[in-house]
Image: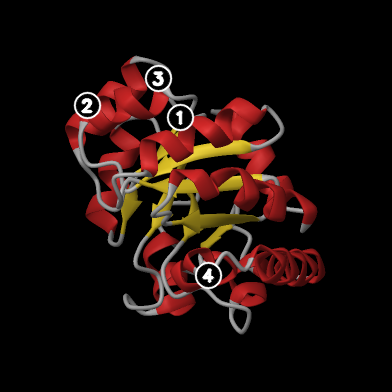
Amino acid sequence: MQELISRLEALRLVPVVKIDKAEDAGALCDALCAGGLPCAEITFRTSAAVEALGIAAARGDMLVGAGTVLSVDQVKQAVDHGASFIVSPGFNPKVVSYCVENGIPITPGTSNPTDIEMALEFGLEVVKFFPAEAFGGLKTLKAVSAPYGMMRFIPTGGINPRNLADYLRFDKVVACGGSWMVTGDLLADKKFSEIERLTREAVELAEKA
């Protein structure tokens, strides 16, 4: 897990991808890498997710994880297809327990002190804060994290170019998850040059934070 944390700290930003056509995975990865962000969290929100995950992971030049993981079976699918880490929207004890017992890095979703304390019980050091903006944004994150100096966060949900730097300046934030540079519309229209441009801009914002 520590190796993953170090890589995320260096990247500072994780593109959250909902991909409808696995055939687009290669071009998407090319665009992200060209934009300076060799990373993707491919969410289990479409039937193409598993195949796309496999394509991305097989490249060997990206940090690839599986997002929106809701069951142990999905964890197994993700790992079998090369996922380096697991992300879930909420805190599912069965999923977290399986990952911890099998040495699979996981950042489960949390939004309140109870979630954070459950994560601590499993020995986790980094969790997802989701949905960040809908739950009060950075102000809420600072408030709920205050008693837990040992825990760090990956805020996701509503992160955009306007608030990215504010989140990244908070010392308990490892990285942020965001989808504005890889929207469904951009993927559907195969606007990979635009994805590359937006990714490059996002990387520059993160570096300045």
**Measuring 42% from the left and 50% from the top, which residue is drawn there?**
21
Alpha carbon separation for disc pair 4 and 1 = 33 Å
Marks 4 & 3, CB-CB < 8 Å contact: no
Rendered image: mark on residue 105: 1
Q: Which residue is mark 4?
A: 189
* Circle 4: element type: loop
Alpha carbon separation for disc pair 4 and 3 = 30 Å
Q: Looking at the rendering, which quadrant does residue 51 occupy?
A: top left
First of labels 4, 3 by sequence position: 3
Q: Which residue is mark 2?
A: 73
Q: Position of residue 13 (x, y in %)?
A: 63, 57
Q: Residues within 10 Å of mark 4 (few under 14, many from 20)?
A: few
Tell me which amino acid carries mark 1. Answer: Pro
Q: Nearer the viewer, mark 4 or mark 3?
A: 4
- Quarter occupied by the C terminus: bottom right
Q: Is residue 106 above or below residue 165?
A: above
Tell me which amino acid carries mark 4. Answer: Asp
**Measuring 55% from the left and 37% from the top, which residue is drawn there?**
64
Q: Closest to the observer: 24 or 84?
A: 24
Q: Closest to the observer: 112 or 176?
A: 176
